[in-house]
């Protein structure tokens, strides 16, 4: 039975449970709800939750675990002789899965009967052609052990699915019966329901932890896998980046890190002065009316998706810079995609980020400090430079660090605007590439996931994650420490 | 005894005369102020330039050049048996329609009186999109009774012709172009004057599917819009309940302990993790580990959900916090349990704020591209519109920003116009969502 039907059945059972639980509680109180411990609907909700939550939890767990367990069992049963020399167990297993899926499809379309699918033999039947008819393309002819494993796979999967249906429905029924049997006038239904809901709330809050855990685990496992194939020393200290999917790649991260930092540096050189001066002007000088118009307009820049900035860099800023610094002008630039292009556009993107964070921080400086400075005869600009900015400095540094972490993690602008060549160069008009751009290019090809050329993306991701996390934690630490001074 | 003398006053003149130092300070003040104004203006100029570039480059995508040709649907070619059997008609491939198109175009050119150096109908056909024959075939298969009649078709012009009339393709460019000659452009001008070639609103760009690399005139954003729609359904369906539940726990119930701290630190860090890292997570967790189908809006939605959750949690907590404690106290005072106080009183009052935050989170997710690249929503041509709920969630599809990225990478500059046009549509969606959020906030948010 497919999972959708199980879910619908359990849902139907749960709704019935609600109605039954409610009426049973009312009946036990003689129809007068004042004699009940809780409101009648809590008795209904109790049965509903007891039916629904454990059953659906078991279903989710089963759906996640079943393929893993079946895979392992079949993989262990696959004889070593079935694995061709140039191949690996993982590749053969993906063949097995594909054949099994193909057989499923063929049975559901009626081109192969269910009994035939279980008893097909490669010597007599041309499996590849017959699966081709239903649209499952196989790379090579199906060998006997693979077919046998595929049939085994189908059998195990269908047994497991049957078991799953039985288990889930049994759990639902058990919950239903147990909850209903406890329902009577004395039962403290509300307390039970509320602690149940609270448990669900805790579970929802834990998803944040699970996400972080998922990120860290998926990065760590694949990175370790990568370091088995490629020495870590060469990755961290190599100065050449030249992946080739045929083998013999050099995967040094230094050129990518250099490109990342160079682009971020230019972006910050654009964003920090403009953002900071805007923040100072808007919070200290601007009349209320101008502030109420200019601030939201600047923040529009932050709401524009990065793909738009990427296209702007590729098609507008790049050609414009090329006209000035390229062949016809100063001849420093070969192509429109360059560090400068990406850096400038990224700087525009970061202006509102710097300005609104600094604005908050400047506003948090107590008015008394301004008044003191004015009282001594300082002008506004002297107050800003000598009193407000020093007081707000830790917060502003925090804001700049947050902007830097944003710049380092930015993807679309550099994918479209910075070029694809990894090089260590000082010329800001050269094309360079970044960590994020290479993650995209290494994982969007047709590469095999097990090759070092694809796995290197996870090591790059790990580096990126560690750097941005470090910057964020440091920035938040500075901001928090500063805030405590005035509270 | 010494002569006590008063010190000489430092300023022997009126305070109203400004001395050099004050002048300098005042000038510094004016300069500083000017820097501020300059910074704000530069920011605003960037905004105007960005929006201007989008509008100027993108408006063209909403216009399309058509060639109006009456085509005689020859029964001898389209339905050899003459039985109007739909299976027979379907057997005629687009190649079978090409001669009809060529004849019709030749006749139209002759009828319009335009003289041209182009001698063959096959040469003239370069004015038309390669999709012209397929367009006629689709019409015939939908209405077999048209066979034998002469039907007025509005065929797509080739992208070079389209670009020429929009000013994107210049005469001097085409000398090196193997798709089209100057003679074609001359003919285009004449036919344009004769009213055979017209420009019209390009509805197909908004509703249509993506097309292959060589037919930019046919490409549309419709299918990827559906992909984005299904992704947003997943994001909304998962991140709103989970986000609200998590915030209620953290804001109303969580005790001050290590576990709560851990969750809070996690949420604030997740909000700052680069989006590409979420793409890696989606790839590793949903595709490598759980074997969900690649390029499916379901996977895209799940990945974006994880990315949107921190945003929603942060804004929901802020709006829960803004409900004054007196509301909770009053509810508890009349005998409600803590859970009842939260769900019956605090949550409804915080709802406008929560919805505003959710819409802003959704708008962010709608424009996000980087994670979608990693789970495979680019690199192929999204031509099939989903035909149901299951296929909408599970069949490979693109999404609006991913489609724009795909167009931006293609070699033909005609696709750049499509990419800009796609951005206009994307920004219209984002603007609408943000305006709804602002209206919600203005109308329903209460201040205590």
Image: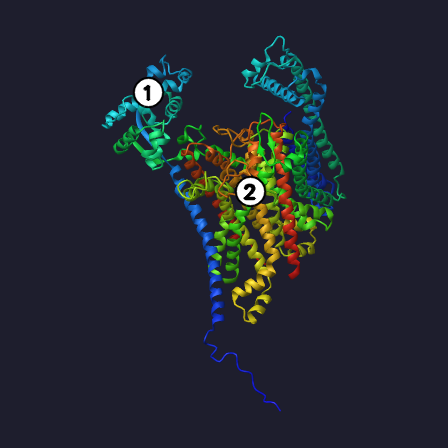
The foreground one among B123 and A258 is A258
Which of the 4 image quadrants contains residue A423?
top right
> Is residue A115 shown above or below B226?
above
Query: How many residues crowd mark 1 within 10 Å: few (<14), some (14–19), many (20+)?
Result: some
Nearer to us: label 2 or label 1: 2
Q: Element under label 1?
A: helix
Say above or below: A19 vs A116: below
Would residue A287 be visible to someone looking at this image?
Answer: no
Protein chain holding label 2:
A
Query: Does A280 appear above or below A220?
Result: below
Comparing B216 with A377, the one in front is A377
Res. A388 mark: none
Q: In the rendered image, is residue B283 in sight?
A: yes
Whether tag 2 and tag 1 are in contact, CB under 8 A, the answer is: no
Give residue A362's position: percent from left, percent from top: 57, 59
Please state, as top left, top right, bottom left or bottom right, where the C terminus of chain A lies in the image.
bottom right
Q: How is the image coloured?
A: rainbow
Mark seen at residue B100: 1
For label 2, the crowd category at 10 Å Cα-Cα, with few meaning under 14, some 14 to 19 and many 20 or more, is many
Question: Badge 2 is on which residue?
Answer: A410
Work out whether residue A343 or residue B436 is closer to the camera in this orientation and state it: A343
| Residue A113 shown left or right of residue A329 in the figure | right
- What is the number of callouts on the image? 2
Residue occupying the point 66% across, 58% down? A484
């Amino acid at each position: 039975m497919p999972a959708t039907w199980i879910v619908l059945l359990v849902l139907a059972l749960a709704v019935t449970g609600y109605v039954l639980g409610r009426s049973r509680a009312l009946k036990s109180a003689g129809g007068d709800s004042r004699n009940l411990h809780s409101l009648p609907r809590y008795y209904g909700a109790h049965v509903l939750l007891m039916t629904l939550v454990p059953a659906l939890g078991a279903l989710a767990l089963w759906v996640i675990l079943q393929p893993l367990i079946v895979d392992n069992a079949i993989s262990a049963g696959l004889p070593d002789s079935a694995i061709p020399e140039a191949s690996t167990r993982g590749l053969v297993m993906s063949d097995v899965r594909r054949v099994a899926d193909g057989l499923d499809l063929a049975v559901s379309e009626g081109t192969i009967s269910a009994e035939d699918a279980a008893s097909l033999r490669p010597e007599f039947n041309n499996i590849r052609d017959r699966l081709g008819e239903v649209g499952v393309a196989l790379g090579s002819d199906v060998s006997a052990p693979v077919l046998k494993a595929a049939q085994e796979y189908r059998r195990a999967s269908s047994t497991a699915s049957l078991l799953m249906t039985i288990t889930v429905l049994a759990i639902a029924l058990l919950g239903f019966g147990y909850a209903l049997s406890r329902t009577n006038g004395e039962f403290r239904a509300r307390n039970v329901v509320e602690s149940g809901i609270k448990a669900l709330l805790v579970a929802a809050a834990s998803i944040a932890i699970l996400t972080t855990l998922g990120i860290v685990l998926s990065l760590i496992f694949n990175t370790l896998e990568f370091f088995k194939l490629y020495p870590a020393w060469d990755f961290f200290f190599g100065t050449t980046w030249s992946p080739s999917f045929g083998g013999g790649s050099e995967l040094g991260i230094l050129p990518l890190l250099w490109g990342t930092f160079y682009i971020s540096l230019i972006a910050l050189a654009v964003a920090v002065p403009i953002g900071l001066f805007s923040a100072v002007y808007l919070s200290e000088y601007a009349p209320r009316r101008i502030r109420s118009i200019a601030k939201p307009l600047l923040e529009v820049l932050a709401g524009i998706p990065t793909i738009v900035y990427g296209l702007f860099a590729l098609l507008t800023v790049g050609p414009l810079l090329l006209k000035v610094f390229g062949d016809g002008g100063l001849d420093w630039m070969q192509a429109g995609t360059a560090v400068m292009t990406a850096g400038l556009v990224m700087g525009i993107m970061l202006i509102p980020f710097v300005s609104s964070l600094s604005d908050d921080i400047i506003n948090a400086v107590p008015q008394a400090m301004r008044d003191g400075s004015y009282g001594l005869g300082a002008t506004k600009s002297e107050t800003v430079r000598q009193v407000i900015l020093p007081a707000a400095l830790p917060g502003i540094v925090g804001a700049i660090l947050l902007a830097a972490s944003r710049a380092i993690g930015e993807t679309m602008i550099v994918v479209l605007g910075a070029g694809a060549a990894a090089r260590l160069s000082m010329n800001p008009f050269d094309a360079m590439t970044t960590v994020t751009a290479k993650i995209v290019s290494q994982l969007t090809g047709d590469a095999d996931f097990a090759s070092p050329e694809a796995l290197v993306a996870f090591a790059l991701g790990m580096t990126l994650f560690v750097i941005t996390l470090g910057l964020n934690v440091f920035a938040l630490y500075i901001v928090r420490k500063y805030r405590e001074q005035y509270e | 005894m010494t002569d006590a003398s008063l010190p000489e006053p430092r300023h022997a003149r009126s305070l109203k005369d400004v001395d050099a130092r004050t002048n300098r300070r005042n000038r510094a003040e004016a300069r500083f102020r000017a820097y501020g104004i300059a910074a704000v203006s530069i920011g605003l100029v960037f905004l105007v330039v960005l929006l201007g570039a989008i509008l100027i480059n993108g408006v063209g995508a909403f216009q399309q050049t058509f060639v109006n040709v009456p085509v005689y649907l020859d029964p001898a070619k389209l339905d050899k048996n003459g039985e109007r059997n739909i299976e027979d008609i379907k057997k005629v491939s687009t190649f079978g329609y090409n001669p009809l198109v060529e004849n019709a175009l030749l006749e139209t050119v002759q009828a319009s009186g335009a003289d041209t150096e182009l001698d063959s109908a096959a040469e003239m056909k370069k004015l038309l999109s390669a999709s012209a024959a397929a367009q006629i075939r689709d019409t015939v298969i939908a209405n077999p009774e048209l066979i034998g009649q002469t039907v007025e078709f509005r065929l797509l012009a080739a992208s070079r012709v389209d670009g020429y009339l929009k000013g994107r393709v210049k005469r001097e460019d085409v000398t090196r172009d193997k798709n089209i000659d100057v003679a074609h452009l001359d003919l285009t001008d004449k036919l344009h004057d004769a009213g055979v070639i017209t420009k019209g609103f390009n509805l197909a760009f908004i509703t249509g599917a993506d097309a292959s690399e060589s037919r930019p005139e046919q490409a549309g954003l419709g299918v990827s819009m559906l992909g984005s729609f299904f992704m947003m359904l997943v994001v909304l369906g998962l991140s709103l309940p989970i986000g609200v539940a998590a915030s209620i726990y953290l804001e109303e119930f969580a005790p001050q302990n290590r576990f709560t701290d851990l969750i809070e630190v996690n949420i604030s860090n997740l909000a700052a993790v680069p989006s590409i890292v979420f793409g890696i997570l989606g790839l590793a967790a949903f595709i490598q580990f759980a074997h969900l189908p690649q390029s499916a809006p379901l996977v895209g939605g799940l990945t974006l959900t994880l990315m949107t959750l921190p945003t929603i949690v942060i804004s929901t907590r802020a709006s829960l916090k803004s409900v004054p404690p007196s509301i909770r106290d009053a509810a508890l005072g009349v005998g409600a349990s803590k859970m009842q106080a939260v769900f019956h009183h605090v949550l409804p009052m915080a709802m406008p704020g929560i919805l505003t935050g959710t819409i802003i989170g959704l708008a962010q997710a709608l424009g996000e591209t980087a994670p979608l690249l990693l789970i495979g929503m680019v690199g192929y041509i999204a031509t099939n519109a989903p035909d149901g709920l299951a296929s909408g969630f599970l069949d490979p599809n693109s999404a609006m920003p991913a489609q724009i990225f795909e167009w931006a990478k293609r070699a033909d500059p005609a696709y750049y116009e499509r990419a800009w046009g796609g951005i206009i549509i994307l920004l219209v969606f984002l603007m609408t969502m943000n305006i709804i959020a602002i209206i919600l906030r203005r109308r329903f948010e209460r201040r205590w």
